[in-house]
Amino acid sequence: MKKTYLSLLLAVAMLLSLLPFTPSSSAATAMQSYVSAMQPGWNLGNTLDATGADETSWGNPVVTQAFVQQIAAQGFKSIRIPVTWMQHTGPAPGYTVDPAWMSRVQQIVDWSLQAGLYVMINMHHDSWQWVNTMPANHDAVLAEYKAVWTQIANRFKNHSNNLMFESINEPVFDGVDDATQFSLLDELNTAFYNVVRGTGGGNATRPLVLPTLHTGSGQTYFDSLNATITKLNDPNLIATVHYYGLWHFSVNIAGYTKFDQASIDHIVNQIDGVYNAFVSKGIPVIIGEYGLLGWDSGEGVPEHGEMLKFIENFTQYARSKGVTHMLWDNGRHFNRTTYQWRDPDLYNVIMQSMTGRSSTANTDLIFLKSGTAVQDAVLDLNLNGNSFVSLKDGSATLSPGTDYTLSGSVLTVKASALAKYASGSFGEKTVLTANFNAGPAWKIHVRYTNKPVQSQASGTIGGGLVIPTSFNGDLLATMEAVYASGGNAGPQNWTSYKEFNYTFTPDYANNTITIKPTFFAETTGGTINLTFHFWSGQIVKYQISLKGNRVTGKPM
């Protein structure tokens, strides 16, 4: 009986050996294990990718070995080093890369490998500087592209396979439809593959990273890249996309001030999309850049607590689907001189996502309004599998039942614990911290406010309008703009809610709100009514009039 059973197993095994192998999502491929070990990742942005004369031309300091070691010490497992080659490449037909530049790239790569990091280098802003002209200059672009990658590949062919190459950043091709762009990207990725593999050495099996068109998401984007990867039939290929959130939320437009269900659904749809298209088929995925577009435009985009909820949700969900993420940092997040995080909360949420989830709440703001009796403040906690432990006011631990209550996930901060802050100067009075059994605390900023007050102002269409604004402790959430005669005013006139910082920006230190020239550039003159929405719920209305190049404004 046992012999018959073993014979049957042998026959089944032989039959299975004749069938094509399809990687299972339950059994990670070697390359999936490689990519998972890269989690979490970090980008050395606005440095070697800068389009000026050297790595400091976009405002970041010279990279040192000590700094690279700090990235590893912070707990990051991989580093993406974007590199722009155009300004360091000679003319046709050789397209020789400046030896000093190549050596500098290698120096930072070597430091990163020595620090124990997985390393990705690429061809970065070349994508829009010259590669994008491939439809009109096909042969010349392809010749330069191959020549540069041949030099890179030869320089690094004996490096550890902890170094990977990414063919091109955010590829785009000018003046042609998507179908043609898909074809050109396939040609480019295939040329990259053949060049690198053809140099031999470690490059024969080096992990290679291939992007979708624009590094964007969508089934047609996925299908096109899938076709390329299937054609190349190489187990050491990785797909890559970028993710900057639901656009409306990411830039704060159309009233999307909160990280709500629409933003959560967007994350789920995007991650599920790459999982179903690639990971489930045995093709690993790296989100080579993630963040929020509004980060680069100034304060308030998005509001701090809403940003943290986005980061928490995205990072943990990506990891749960086996998708590695790499934070885009152009110098804004990790201070490259002091080695300190400008926003430690952001860092703590990212690191907690590697092992679990962080707890958050529906808001990180409590407003105490002047002239109004202080009320209990009610917050809905998103425990995310954790347990509430304590509530602190600074270093003082508050008393349950007396200072606050917790019913399920509803935290109520008693008016008696808040009343002492409803006097004196306006602004932030204290920070409460909700502490949990795992992950970082959720910080709750208590602010004492009065209704903001605005004054008359004058300016020009070309120079903008600076509105004197006494914020009185409040924070601006968004602004609406409509013509007095009807219709939405300013850019993106499909919505009355304008894009934060692109069309208007607050300056809390100097008590002003500036309506920018970018707003007036897309107006038709006449009278425009502005509505300023503040996070406390206060609403302030203001009217501006345009006559020729002159702009005047007054409170309504």
Image: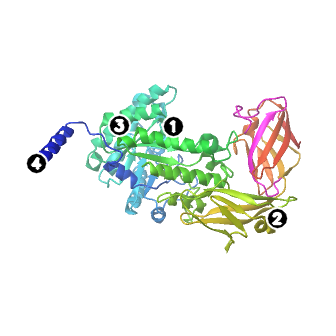
Callout 3: 10 Å neighbours few (<14), some, many (20+)?
A: many
Kindly identify the residue that appears in the image at 79 percent across and 45 percent down.
Answer: 532
Q: CA distance from mark 4 to mark 1?
A: 66 Å
Q: Is residue 280 above or below residue 339?
A: above
Query: Is any atom of residue 258 visible in this view?
Result: yes
Left-right relation of 375 to 5: right
User: What residue would you read off at disc 2?
Assistant: 422
Q: Position of residue 184 (x, y in %)?
A: 42, 30
- Colour logic: rainbow
Q: Which residue is mark 3?
A: 229
- Between marks 2 and 1, how big is the CA–CA gap? 53 Å
First in sequence: mark 3 vs mark 4: 4
Can you identify the residue that label 1 sits on? 128
Of the residues tagged 4 and 2, which is closer to the observer?
4
- Do the numbered discs 2 and 1 sit on residues whose CB atoms are within 8 Å? no
The answer to whether the residue labelled 4 contacts the one labelled 1, judged by CB atoms less than 8 Å apart, is no
SS at mark 1 in the image: helix
Residue corresponding to mark 4: 3
Q: How many marks?
A: 4
| Residue 135 in view | no
Q: Name the residue type under label 3.
A: Ile
Residue type of the residue flagged with mark 1: Trp
